[in-house]
Image (spheres, rainbow, N blue to C red):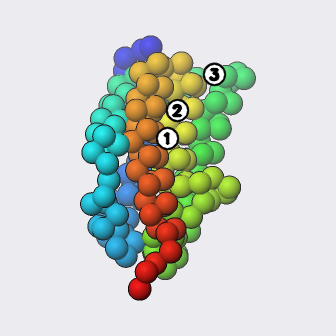
Amino acid sequence: MNFGFSYVGLVYLAMLMIPNLIWARNKPENYAQYAGKEKRVLLAFERVGEVLVSAVALVFSDFNLRPWNAWCLWLVLSFVLMLLYEAFWIRYFRSGKTMRDFYRGFAGIPVAGATLPVAAFFLLGVYGKNVPMLLATVILGVGHIGIHLAHAKEGNKPRRD
């Protein structure tokens, strides 16, 4: 592990945060009612994971580009997942912006808005051989994916009108 600024980490965080900032003004209808039911333990894992992943992505130069070798395929795969994440957001922003639109699978990946970035950052940790990133993404994944799975499950319940 090498301390130093990671421009790759910065690019990943921009790819993560820009759509989320746009989403803040384009939340699905009734999202607040789902958010109010989030389990505190999962929320704590998510928040701690967000902080850790963001910090680790920026302060370790292990994620920066290096001369090509087979190990770089981890970075390529990670970046492909981030591109799929961007495509997920494009589909959502063009949709009716319902809870079903938000939690619908994408490219065969369930709760893609949560799963894709967590998997991408995990593979970034593999590429950088960076244990703190691997641990941070596991913490983030437990919370973030757990919360989104619960929301998706709640959104798929039959409505009683």
Q: Which residue is mark 1?
A: 118
Characterize the local packing of mark 1: few (<14), some (14-19) or many (20 or more) Cα atoms within 10 angstroms: many
Q: Are marks 1 and 2 in contact (CB under 8 Å)?
A: yes
For mark 2, what is the residue?
Answer: 122
Give x and y (percent) for residue 113. Answer: 50, 55
Q: Residue at x 63, y 45 (%)?
A: 80
Q: Quadrant of residue 140?
A: top left
Tag 2: Cα neighbours inside 10 Å, few (<14), some, or many (≥20)? Answer: many
Instruction: Say few, some or many: other residues with alpha carbon within 10 Å of mark 3 (under 14 / 14 to 19 / 20 or more).
Output: few
Q: SS class of the residue under badge 1?
A: helix
Which mark sits nearer the N-terminus, 3 or 2? Answer: 3
Whole-number angstrom distance, CA of label 3 to CA of label 1: 25 Å
Q: Does residue 21 show up? A: yes
Residue for badge 3 = 67
Q: Quadrant of the N terminus?
A: top left
Please tell me whether mark 3 or mark 1 is closer to you in this view.
1
> Which residue sits furthest bottom?
161
Please, is residue 130 above or below residue 160 in the view? above
Q: Quadrant of residue 3?
A: top left
Type of the residue with mark 3? Pro
Q: Quadrant of the C terminus?
A: bottom left
Secondary structure beneath label 2:
helix
| Location of residue 153 in the rendering, given as x and y in whole percent from the top left corner | 49, 60
The quadrant where residue 148 appears: bottom left
- Percent across and percent down for residue 37 are 30, 58
Q: CA distance from mark 1 to mark 2?
A: 6 Å
- Give the residue type that dot 2 points to: Phe
